Amino acid sequence: MDDAGFAAYVHIPFCAVRCGYCDFNTYTNTNFGVGASTSDFHESLATEIDLSSRRLGTSGPLTSVFFGGGTPTMLDSAQLVAVLGKLRDTFGIAPGAEITTEANPETVSEESLGELVAGGFTRMSFGMQSAVPQVLHTLDRQHTPGQVTRAVKWARKLGLDVSVDLIYGAPGESLADWRTSLAAAIELGPDHISAYGLTIEPGTKMGAQLRRGEIAEPDPDELADKYLMAEELLSDSGYQWYEVSNWCRPGHPSRHNLAYWQNKNWWGYGPGAHSHFNGTRWWNLKHPLSYAARLASGDLPVADYEELTDEERREEEIMLGVRLREGISIPAGTAPSTVGELIADQLIDAQAAFSGRIQLTVKGRLLADTVIRHLW
């Protein structure tokens, strides 16, 4: 490991309610036992941080830290600050590093956010998802639109950067509903807005509803229309896309997520968390109790790992880099006819291609997977 540092992801697996679309490693049970309950889970994370430092040796400072989930704010602010402090004491944190936690709006107060700021957090990512009560109900979200407004105002008052997440394509959501949600998000004035098209995964509540015929798959054409609406309204309001599903005000991209898309190094802490260092990937045991038990035995909670081949690393760099606004250099060995076809289909910018780069057009963003397959 060199002195360039690395990013840290901390997975908090607890949620008050499991949303119908969620296929993340999350649990509504908050008391699995020693080291795997909301009361002492932070102690397991501290143990994993210690064990990781022995494995890494000289590591350089943390370039960003991101607490995700689940709902990290199911832990109290003092616990989150303690974990951040453990990371700081163990690895150091680079000056000006971005320190983010996700939060559902109903799990924070002005007081709890103030404790996070005092402990070193710099950024909040709120799960807004929609501003339409009917859509929130369909998605099994627990907050009301008014609570998002309050949470963002508190965060702003405390000097935090703010991001909000939106989801489009929920069953029954109209184009007018989606416009309402976009307008409400813009009105909040966050630094960053993520907008993700709904995908219904097997094993989720919505997956079961789909199998029973109670809901339909999101319509691809409607999803495309909603994406184009997002691009129009957000760009008109001063937001610029920097990754296919992410827009920000100038100077406010998610630096932590950029570390993923730029294929940099990160260590993932917590149950089911994934890590990447120099072409090696590994992932932790998923269940909180198994995770805590492995740590208690003195071992890292790794479930398995893989060493990427040179070809796999090349493909991954293409897959991730193409999604970014700046794109990638045209991969070595790409036939001129392939580039010409992508230009003819209006999937990549012609001027950028003549300069040796692959940069997606708006149409290309809708069909990013198609572009990636051509380049592989």
Image (cartoon, rainbow, N blue to C red):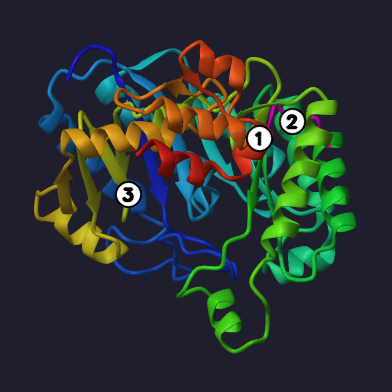
Amino acid type shown at disc 1: Ser
Q: Residues within 10 Å of mark 2 (few under 14, many from 20)?
A: many
Label drawn at residue 141: none
Q: Earlier in the sequence, mark 3 or mark 2?
A: 2
Q: Which residues are magenta?
A: 188-192
Amino acid type shown at disc 2: Pro
Q: State how far apart marks 3 and 1 are (Cα).
A: 22 Å
- Give the residue at x 50% y 68%: 201
Q: Viewed as shown, does residue 357 lie left or right of 86? A: right
Q: Viewed as shown, does residue 171 lie left or right of 55? A: right
**Does the residue at mark 1 contact the one at mark 2 (Cβ under 8 Å)?**
yes
Residue 237 position in % (x across, y down)? 84, 27
Instruction: Tell me which secondary structure the magenta stretch mostly adopts.
Output: loop
Residue 126 position in % (x across, y down)? 65, 43
Label drawn at residue 190: 2
**Quadrant (top left, top right, bottom left, bottom right) of the C terminus:** top left
Of residues 37 and 339, the one nearer the viewer is 339
Q: Viewed as shown, does residue 134 lie left or right of 5? A: right
Amino acid type shown at disc 3: Ala
Of residues 288 and 177, the one nearer the viewer is 177
Of residues 158 and 312, the one nearer the viewer is 312
What residue sits right under mark 3 in the picture? 273
